[in-house]
């Protein structure tokens, strides 16, 4: 029975799982759970993941959610996954686990909160919360600094000084790729100072091409849509201002 | 060389790691990093964990932080750890990983934020933030409901319907034990409705006695101290009010 992946490619952990499967030749069926249509709240999806979050997988009779758990499971049970993704060496594995755990309360928390409270709020029907965004930016910038100064220490192109990517590289880079939907100004302010992080994103992208680009297409489409609608609303407001000034 | 654990027993993940070692007969040296004295910010500790958080371990030349990563590492490398703590069965292991990942953004986020913004703020030299506490309480109550209705589903006394505890039981129960420092009123309001959670805490405590009680002693001491200082300040303010009313 084919592995089923319930995902929305606008969710960064969904993308990490899909890219992982594609890169490693794991056959799967992708079932889209459209977050903007609130399909994750449907009773059908509750049977798959009672926590109502994507991604989730069904492998035969086995159901699993939480992207890190899914990546570890897939790396362990599917034959042909290269060792560097989740090494059998217990010391290397422990370090990757440490990065993944750190990710939850640091990079993920900062990045997801910032993106939701700036670029994505209107599309999700939410109010922007500038205070939450400001705090999240601090958290995010501090996390990027720590990636740069600590996790990317060493001679390799990947986390933990490695020469090949692990599931942690994929998970964290997909998180940072979410920043693509921001205004260029915001994105440059946040990512600009972190040259090593930018190189590492490029290395991870190169190591997982063409799947990385294909799975991220939607992010760039959403960015374009947000940009166009922002320009439109600015033009309209400009017209209104001009009209008002003439009245 | 003996395993070194850098910990403060007032930190819930520190307690989980210490209890795990004691229960499983893992010999270790406990090095106290007193958070209230800001010892986690010292240059010496930065060499152990550049993220400046407890717990952290040093096992020979190997350094590791993040409590879930530490628990998994210890369960894998130390002989004599019973299989139920972190089963070799990949399906059971994946489910435990899923609970641990879920913990980060749900129970931990709610519980830690609530406790810091209510009972512990003055002791940590912080201002209480009632809005953050209110939001955290919602998050915490929702997490406890999910533990009760989903993670504790099944006939066993432990998470995932198991008959014996795993590292996930220990980690999550130590988190909830932090609620002991709250005012009784707050604690009862939050924990009261969750009878199954209360039974599960008791089961985990029983399965890890006497170490569970010994390692948690400090929490009850801090509770007593906070309670006494609150009573004192209430009496003083009562005296002041009485005096003022006579002036």
Image (cartoon, coloured by chain):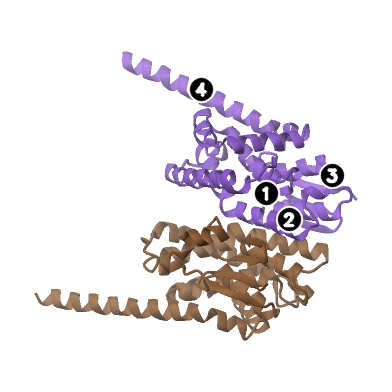
Chain colours: A brown, B purple
For the residues labelled 1 and 2, say whether their Cβ atoms are less than 8 Å apart: yes
What subunit carries mark 3?
B
Say which of marks 1 and 4 sits in front: 1
Badge 4 and badge 2 both on one subunit: yes
Q: Give the residue displayed 60% in from the left and 59% down from the top.
A: A104
- What number is the disc on residue B160? 1
Q: Is residue B150 above or below residue A232?
A: above
For marks 3 and 4 on the same chain, the one whose residue lies earlier in the sequence: 3
Badge 1 and badge 4 both on one subunit: yes
Read off the residue under disc 3: B28
Q: Nearer the viewer, residue B30 or A103?
A: A103
Instruction: For mark 3, give the secondary structure.
Output: strand
Say which of marks 4 and 2 sits in front: 2
Q: Give the residue displayed 54% in from the left and 79% down from the top.
A: A216
Read off the residue under disc 2: B92
Badge 3 and badge 2 both on one subunit: yes
Q: Quadrant of residue A119?
A: bottom left
- Label 4: how many residues lie within 10 Å, few (<14), some (14-19) or many (20+)? few
Instruction: For mark 2, give the secondary structure.
Output: helix
């Amino acid at each position: 029975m084919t592995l089923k992946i319930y995902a929305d490619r606008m969710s960064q952990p969904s993308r990490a799982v899909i890219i992982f499967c594609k890169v490693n030749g794991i056959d799967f069926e992708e079932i889209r759970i459209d977050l903007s249509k609130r399909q994750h709240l449907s009773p059908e999806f509750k049977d798959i993941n009672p926590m109502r979050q994507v991604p989730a997988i069904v492998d035969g009779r086995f159901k699993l959610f939480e992207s890190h758990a899914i990546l570890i499971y897939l790396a362990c049970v599917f034959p042909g996954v290269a060792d560097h993704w989740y090494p059998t060496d217990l010391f290397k594995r422990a370090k990757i686990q440490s990065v993944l755990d750190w990710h939850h309360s640091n990079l993920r928390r900062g990045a997801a909160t910032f993106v939701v409270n700036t670029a994505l709020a209107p599309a999700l029907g939410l109010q922007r919360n500038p205070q939450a965004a400001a705090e999240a930016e601090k958290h995010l910038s501090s996390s990027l600094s720590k990636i740069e100064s600590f996790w990317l220490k060493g001679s390799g192109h990947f986390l933990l000084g490695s020469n090949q990517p692990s599931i942690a590289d994929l998970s964290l880079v997909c998180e940072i790729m979410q920043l693509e939907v921001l205004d260029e100004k915001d994105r440059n302010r946040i990512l600009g100072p972190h040259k090593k992080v930018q190189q590492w994103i490029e290395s991870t992208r190169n190591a997982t091409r063409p799947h990385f680009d294909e799975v991220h297409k939607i992010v760039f489409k959403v960015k374009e849509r947000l940009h166009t609608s922002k320009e439109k609303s600015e033009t309209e407001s400009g017209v209104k201002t001009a009209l008002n000034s003439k009245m």
